[in-house]
Amino acid sequence: HFMHFWERLARAPRGGRPQKCMKCKERPPVLIIRVGDAFCKACFKDYFVHKFRATLGKNRCIFPGEKVLLAFSGGPASSAMVRQVQEGLSREAAKKLRFKPGILFIDEGAVCGQGLEKRGEICSQVEMILRATGFPFHLVHLEEVFDLPGSVLCSISHNATDDGQNYKAAVDGFIRRQQQQSEKSGDSLPGQLSELSIRSPSGKEAVEVAHTGELAHLFRAVKTLTAKEELLQTLRNHLIVHVARTNGYTKVMTGDSCTRVAIRLLTNLCLGRGAFLAGDTGFSDSRHGDVLLLRPMREHSAKEIAFYNRLFGVPSVFTPSLVTKAPDRASIHRLIESFLYKLQTEFPSTISTVYRTGEKLGTTPRDAAAGGDTEPEHCLLCLCTLDTNVVDGSSLQSTLLSEEFCQKPPLFAGSGCCGGETPNQTGCGQGSPTAGAHLPQAPLLPLLCYSCRLTIRDMACLEPLPPYIHSEAERRQRRAAMKREIQEFLLEDDEALPAS
């Protein structure tokens, strides 16, 4: 690789600007992705499209005829993803995509303090872009999380169909069915989607304000910007999964680029999510069971996406977020992002190195819980397997032990400064508001993974959380209490039944 780099560099003229495209060797280049990698406009498009198709092709997660939901945020990456799907379903595509797409946009303006007028303008711009695609789309508001059912926090097992056993057989069967339908009706898949989008409009002309105050109150109860970003990501994922389930989508595509995946990888390490990196940054995430989350843009860097959108006129919408205009040290997310961008300026392979390192991570099934459960318990918020089983000598045990000592009241009492001169007077050590205080988050903490515990600890109170979180937490607590009551009557897995 080192010699190959210098060979490419030697082909460039002394002025530093190559005269021909590195792929076709004919047309003049219009952009340089890396040192020596100069592309003309046509070759760059082929390179970009091939990356997207290869990412989907080598994983073979999407079967013909499946309904796939495209999570559209209005940003460059998700806009480029929608354009790739749009071109892949067109008549001119060499190898057409064979799934049925739909698009979802979530309005998060209430979290950022936007007024109804501004939110309405952004939704109008988004709706205009989505209508132009010809796909069915859904415009929802983040306030709708307060109406979600508790089942959204459950991982629903999904049994693969017979076609899922053989991808090639599923493709051949789909092609035959499409040919038979086209002979009868003469309609193509894009035409059917276009008609479907007309029959299924966004449905909501005005911004729902029923739960806007509750949502604002929820985020005001969170103390740090880091916890706010994590909570927003959690609520967003819950709403995406609910929309996918209620509308029959089995796959969800997100626009996470290579740059965003690298940032998330280091951020999650800092937030104590090292055990879940494979699911949080990998191509597929199956924690929800029946709905599979996919990241088909994870091979594209932010620079490549920006060039593609600029050269081929891909429309996007700027939507302010929680970290818009925030300083570098406002949150862990912003700090890691600033660190990687600055390092990338001096060392251009930084982000790709971090990304490739994370790509080697895989998921391994955890052992059953110590209580003898047949299945491991899952976090109430992120639905990952709980990583809070305390093992002797582990860092988690040390952390919990330190917290316990910090919250214990002093063991001494008597007259004087620290003990209090009178029975009604509080001593110095006992006057601390945190000493011996009962945390309001304590009932919820056993149901959460380590990272989600940190997020909940940054909340002043738990009452503003959406009702579906409280209801599911109560259900799990009742189930755990019932299990403790009948524990002595249960047979362990290693106990053999007496022979008859």
Image (cartoon, rainbow, N blue to C red):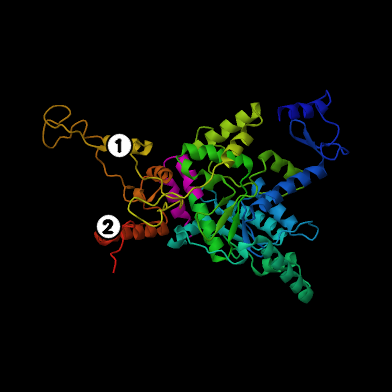
Q: Could you tell me residue 121's position as x and y percent?
A: 63, 53
> Mark 1 highlights which residue?
401
At 41% from the left and 56% from the top, the residue drawn is 375
Q: Is residue 433 visible?
A: no
Name the image quarter holding residue 479.
bottom left
Please give left or right for residue 426 compared with residue 465 in the image.
left
Amino acid residing under circle 1: Leu
> Which residue appears at 40% of the width and 42% of the height?
454
Q: Give the vertical position of 266 relative to 49 (above or below).
A: above
Task: Identify residue for label 2.
Answer: 484
Q: Horizontal and vertical percent for residue 347? A: 64, 27
* Residue 141 part of the magenta-drawn span: no
Q: Is residue 454 above or below residue 181?
A: above
Which span is picked out in magenta? 210-233
Disc 1 vs disc 2: which is toward the camera?
2
Sequence order check: which comes first, mark 1 or mark 2?
Answer: 1
Tell me the element at label 2. Answer: helix
- Disc 1: CA contacts within 10 A as few (<14), some (14-19) or many (>=20): few
- Amino acid type, callout 2: Arg
* Helix, strand or loop under label 1: helix
**Does the magenta stretch mainly form a helix, a strand or a loop?**
helix
Q: CA distance from mark 1 to mark 2?
A: 25 Å
> x, y percentage for residue 352?
63, 36
Q: Is residue 26 visible?
A: yes
